[in-house]
Amino acid sequence: MGFDLARGTTYDDGGDVVEFGKRGPRFNIAGWEWLIETAKKHGWTPGPLTLRGEPYDGGYYFNDGQVVSAETAIAWADALERAYPYRGETGRWRQLVADFIVFCRAGAFEIW
């Protein structure tokens, strides 16, 4: 199971996806869990989620297209920056975290 992030997905009147929005970073379950748990340890509180405009109770560990609000996304980025302040380091994981932080700073997004 993996987690694909996007923003701006469009739906038809029946609630089916017409077109996926702009794609963001992708994570496997271990990477996704690291992002969540590390951010929590550095002051982030997961905010409420929505799905097609309605409250979503499934949480962050499902990939149903639920939406993370802009406020929650920006707070997530803040927490990860506190956890991972060394921007000069290189490596694939470091780059993925940096890409996720930039993606969060752009606002609300969907988890697929």
Image (tube, helix red, strand yellow):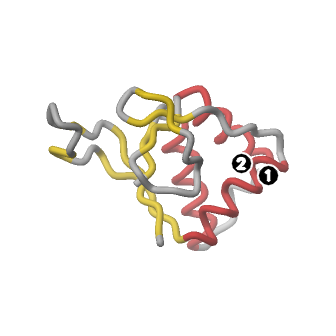
Would you say 15 lies left or right of 49 here? left
* Residue appearing at x 24%, y 48% in the figure: 20
Quarter of the image where one finds residue 15: top left
Would you say 22 lies left or right of 36 here? left
Q: Is label 2 in a helix, a strand or a loop?
A: helix
Amino acid type assigned to the residue bearing label 1 in the image: Ala
Report the disc number at residue 80. 2
Would you say 38 lies left or right of 101 here? right
Task: Say above or below: 2 vs 60.
Answer: below
Task: Say above or below: 75 vs 103.
Answer: above
**Residue 37 horizontal/vertical position (percent):** 75, 56
Q: How dense is the environment of label 1, judged by Cα within 10 Å: few (below 14), some, or many (20 and up)?
A: some
* Residue appearing at x 55%, y 47% in the figure: 58
Amino acid type assigned to the residue bearing label 2 in the image: Leu
**Residue 17 horizontal/vertical position (percent):** 21, 46
Residues at marks 1 and 2 touching, judged by CB atoms closer than 8 Å: yes
Would you say 77 lies left or right of 14 here? right
Quarter of the image where one finds residue 75: top right
**Residue 100 horizontal/vertical position (percent):** 54, 51
Viewer-side residue, 83 vs 17 = 17
Viewer-side residue, 31 vs 64 = 64
Q: How dense is the environment of label 2, judged by Cα within 10 Å: few (below 14), some, or many (20 and up)?
A: many
Q: Give the Cα separation between the discs numbered 1 and 2.
A: 5 Å
What residue did someone put label 1 on? Answer: 83
Viewer-side residue, 78 vs 50 = 50
Quadrant (top left/top right/bottom left/bottom right) for the C terminus? bottom left
* Residue appearing at x 56%, y 72% in the figure: 92
Q: Is label 1 in a helix, a strand or a loop?
A: helix
